[in-house]
Image (cartoon, rainbow, N blue to C red):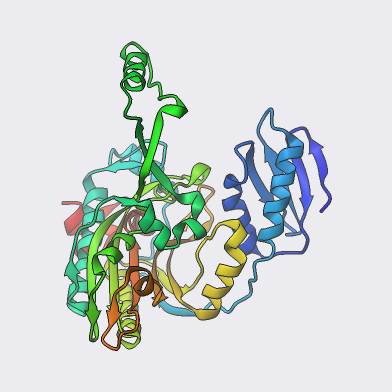
Amino acid sequence: MNKHVTNFNEIILPLSREIDREIAGDIEKESVFVSPQIDRIIVSEDLKSAKLIARDGANMEEVADKAKRFLDVMVKQVSGFEIKVFVDIKRKDTGPYQIGVNDGLVERGWMHDYGKGQVAYSGPVLKLAQLINEKAGELYKKAYNATDGHFPAMIDADTLHKCGYFDSHPNAVTFVGNVVEDFDAIEEFRRANSCSEGALLPQPEHIHIDGMCLNPAACFPCYPTLKGKTYLTGECFTWMGRVFRYESRNINGLDRLYEFNVRELVFVGTEEYVRECRAKALPIVEEMATFFDIDCQVQTATDPFFATVSAAKKFWQAAQEVKNEIKIPALGNDGSTKMLACGSINLHGNFFGKRFEFYCANGEPAQTGCVGLGIERWVLAAFTQHGFEPHRWPEAVRNRIFS
């Protein structure tokens, strides 16, 4: 792969083959994890090359080498699988989509954006988030008789390792650290901050990582609690999960948060039971979309795996059709329409049954599946499609969130 320097901070890197828009999107999103010296990698309009934009002072030879290796593995992804649409709901509201929702919510005092992938919200935003969670919980209880639960926001590294997360999404993990249990190190940290104008962090050698992480997927903490159980048919569990995924410079309002909430549903049992549960999820998504009166689709999809394993894992997911994504239209900052991934419906086979040792009555590892609804993205999509004026919202929703 040759490289062409356009100016001091930019390099054009030709791709080994012409790619499609889906792979181009993955390249641009995942490029923030290539090097701290790289600002972005942007794929050209003809999809045959990519522009590396480096930060001031970057070692251009070093970043070009990393970018080349990154692009080499990303272009190996196989695309072109047929995207099957299982749900396609059209809203009744005939008004235009609302642009600038994030800014509009902040201006109205309904949301505060801390700027690091965390938001606080109140008023109609809080009431809508609560309603989305409650509505999903009611539907899960009715359709699955799902057991309500609660799980912690932190998860140990051994559990994430068993879940395969370090192998698939190592870039998204957040480790929890603390000041090492040392009198002098703690006192040094205390004294440094006793008279400083801003926070001073401990010396790197004084940070201890004890194997705890912030949970990056709502379903994971459920599986260790199932160890040793045996299922004649199956069982369902549901809860609100607090989720943390490191997104680097991809953070953008409610579109892409570091910390967010997921209404989770996990089903576990025989293969027949799990597949029946997955099928039941489609009409539930239809009912949710109809209740909130939003355009919505459910279609086949794949996860955004780390670059070096992306090609193989995406191919397997697409070929097996184990992931369906809930896509809801929203608007980008430039007013263009984008399909926002607001949740997913997944089959895991017996992966977690094997790893965490829970079984079917015949002695085989039990199978699992899950449904996750990203609460804040549903909020963003609903405000995008109905705007800020109460009269455009469905009556049942309007009476709840604007009262």
* Rendered view: 386 above or below 228: above
* Rendered view: 95 above or below 207: below
Q: Residue at horizontal 68%, vertical 37%?
A: 54
Is residue 287 visible to the viewer in this orientation of the structure? no
| Residue in the foreground of this view, choosing between 51 and 103 | 51
Q: Quadrant of the N terminus?
A: bottom right
Residue 84 is situated, as x and y percent measured from the top left of the image, at 51, 80
Number of numbered discs overlaid on the protein picture: 0
- Image-based side of 173 in relation to 1, left or right: left
Residue 96 is situated, as x and y percent measured from the top left of the image, at 42, 59
Is residue 169 visible to the viewer in this orientation of the structure? yes
| Residue in the foreground of this view, choosing between 331 and 151 | 151
Residue 263 is situated, as x and y percent measured from the top left of the image, at 28, 62
Q: Residue at horizontal 41%, vertical 45%?
A: 174
- Image-based side of 63 in relation to 202, left or right: right
* Rendered view: 300 above or below 292: below
Residue 154 is situated, as x and y percent measured from the top left of the image, at 30, 49
- Image-based side of 40 in relation to 379, left or right: right
| Residue in the foreground of this view, choosing between 158 and 97 | 158
| Residue in the foreground of this view, choosing between 226 and 108 | 226
* Rendered view: 96 above or below 197: below
- Image-based side of 296 in relation to 138, left or right: right
